[in-house]
Amino acid sequence: MAQPILFTCALLLVSTVVIMVFLEIFEISPISSRFDWATISRLQLEKSSGPNAFSELMAKMPSKRTNKWIVVTSIQSPTEDVKRLASYPDWTLVVVGDTKTPADWGLPDVHYLSIETQESMGFDSVTRLPKRSYTRKNAGYLYAIANGAQWIYDTDDDNKPYGKGLDQFEYSSDRSRGLRFTTLEWPNTTLQESLFNPYRHFGRPDMWPRGFPLEHIKNHGHYDGSYRLCHVQRPAAVQQGIVQKDPDVDAIYRLLHAEPTTGLDESFSEFAPPVILAPGTYAPWNSQNTLFSRSAFFGLFLPTTVAFRVTDIWRSYFTQALLHAAGETVSFVPVNAIQRRNAHSYLKDFDDEIDVYDKAGEIVQFIDEWKCEAQTMDKCTIELAEKFAEHGFWGYDDAQLVIHWVLDLKEIGYNFPALRPGARSDYPIGEDKDIRRNCRRAHVTFSNDLPVNKSLPAEKRAQQKINNFGDLKHWCDESPSNASKAWLFPAPEQLAEATVENTTLTDNYQTVAIISNNWQWGFGMGMLQRMYEANFAMLIFCGHYPKQSREAYKNKFPEGMGGGDVTYPNLKRPINYIDLSNEEVRWGYLMYYCLAKVEEMKIQNVKGYVMFSDDAIFNFWNPVNLNIMQGTKRANGWGPWWPNEKFGFQSMNRTIQMFNGEYLKYFKKTLTLTNLPFEVGRKERIDIVSKKPVTDPFQYLMVGDGWVIGDWIYVPATNISFVATFAQIAHEAELFHELFTSKMLHILPSEGLHKQCLP
């Protein structure tokens, strides 16, 4: 009896050895707890069929190949949305097929990859992709990269560009400007504080994207200290666009809010600008409306061992960890697509998303603590893939597939970005005394309380106005005056109906109001909020706003104001502000700098910007032509500040020298230099001393043709870039506020209001 047992055991042992050798020979052995880099190098050397096979394939494909590619996967005949994507002249569309895709699928100039075509491309990672899987998109990514793509737009065949569409993304490769979400303002940042909810930023704090850790939703917020504003920062490597109507939310949100037959009908703030997430901050993003620059192509990989509703979310967290190691970032941009989803089982989605609910928080915790042991990004990618498998975030098959993905990328000549230790400390807040500081503290919050249809009454805004003036009434009631006791307010619907009939008031809804302060804010902000906030697209305080603590949002008044605010209505939080140091403001002499900083925010879809000082009262109900600049003109000539050696004519000379010197090659300054001769040449300019015409634009800058009061100015959106660029340079040259304002009002088309907007 013992002999058969021994024989059987020996047979099993021999069979096991044979199978292991077979698996090793065909490179499909299970991955060990540590990767063998020598084996990976051998695999790379053995790859030889790819380039030749791919070259032969390309000879049969359409000739259209741009540097911008769109990748979708589809199992149906070309949809109208796909046909629209195919029509963009600057973009090349590649459609990845599967077993269910019609055999005769085709569109002119579209690169269609059937299963057979994918298998013939020569990429080992593609041959290992499962069929009937969304992850076959990986084949399309490699195809686009091999064809020289510099940008890849990742989307689906039921997504439609909306509004600015693909032009909403930024295609700069060297510099950007704008808001930056970070938690480095506070020490000992918690994981919850490092999470960014894009829907909150775009005016919907009641929503959360699929993949946001559920355990952090209830008490999550973007508190004071979460944002900073940077004049120059590196553009994001990945940009996620917000989707209108039926955005990407999880099944829990849909079960609570979606209609069974029509789905969701959601909208977002039309004013909220793009925002870059600094390394060390995290948010989930999807594969439905996302732009990748070439530096992030290595992160396009979709894992195959997780559910369909999980794969792109896990990719987003996996890629963020690697991007941060290279100092690269992710950004979220305003609505640029719309989706109308077919009715389907949200309970089925719920089942598919179980891992998202259960593990998203754990993944964020892991990637926040992970440090790559390797020295290059390709090896870090493989290392992190193994760690994901070890922690059960995805299967070992994906860890192995990432090896072949990396090798395929290297084979087609893709250059992985370099690692950059210390990237989390990029773009710090500059010193107050540095008037050229790059980044500063700022805070913004947006709401979605205006109807998409501008002809409809804005009842939410009307209610806010009534609440605000109710607060002011209570405040006035406590004063010796009895006037406020007789104040009566209409119902919200009455006020909304009356407002929608008033063009001036509805135009204000599309205008940004900026209140400036010559000194550190000390009191009255709560009162000013209630006077103006609900009447404009947004209200921004600009001046020195003291750094606030983590718990500041719980206080009735801002910290660091010496208690001077307690006699005024309490601050309404959150508050929108841009911090200018006392050195940058210089007693109010340089307050126009606020216009440069507000323009850097890239606020969307506004008609213009009105800036006024905190000690002026703006009668915003008076009609104003919002198509041209407005100001309060005072007299002819330059006024008393021109002879001042520090802030007068010498400052204008320095401004001209800077335009022609260190800023000559900066693209925004170059644009302003191009526009300056045009604007000056719109009409005859006369030197008030020589009485002769002036045609040279820089000579004209030295001509005093009228000066203005600087307490109120309006700049239309069409002119804000020109004004902001000029303000950036004039501020560095320390040109006096009223001299700057005067020159802008005379260079650009303008009207003098002669105090009709001021009391």
Image: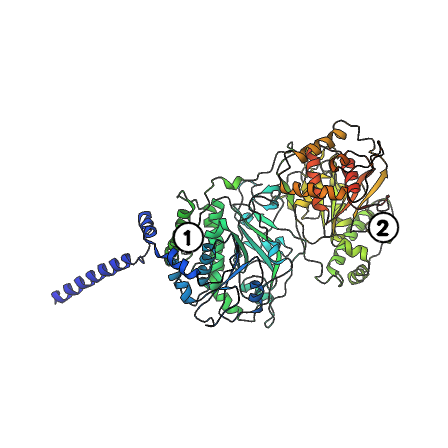
For mark 1, what is the residue? 412
Residue neighbourhood size for the residue with mark 2, other residues' Cα within 10 Å, grouped as few (<14), some (14–19), many (≥20): some
Which residue appears at 65% of the width and 59% of the height?
163
Q: Name the residue type under label 1.
A: Ile
Q: Looking at the picture, how far across and down is residue 186, in whole percent?
A: 57, 41
Q: Name the residue type under label 2.
A: Ser
Q: Quadrant of the C terminus?
A: top right
Figure disc tally: 2
Along the viewing direction, whichever of 219 and 385 lies nearer the viewer = 385
727 displayed left or right of 358: right
Q: Secondary structure at mark 1?
A: loop
Quarter of the rendering containing residue 233: top right
Residue neighbourhood size for the residue with mark 1, other residues' Cα within 10 Å, grouped as few (<14), some (14–19), many (≥20): some
Disc number for residue 455? none
Along the viewing direction, whichever of 137 and 221 lies nearer the viewer = 137
757 displayed left or right of 348: right
Quarter of the rendering containing residue 638: top right
Indicate how the structure is coloured in the image. Answer: rainbow
Can residue 363 be seen here? The reply is no
Along the viewing direction, whichever of 477 and 624 lies nearer the viewer = 624
Disc number for residue 484? 2
User: Which of the two marks, 1 or 2, is nearer to us in this view?
Assistant: 1
Q: Earlier in the sequence, mark 1 or mark 2?
A: 1
Residue 570 higher or lower than 167, as above or below: above
Which residue appears at 71% of the width and 61% of the height?
451
Q: Looking at the picture, how far across and down is residue 720, in whole percent?
A: 71, 46
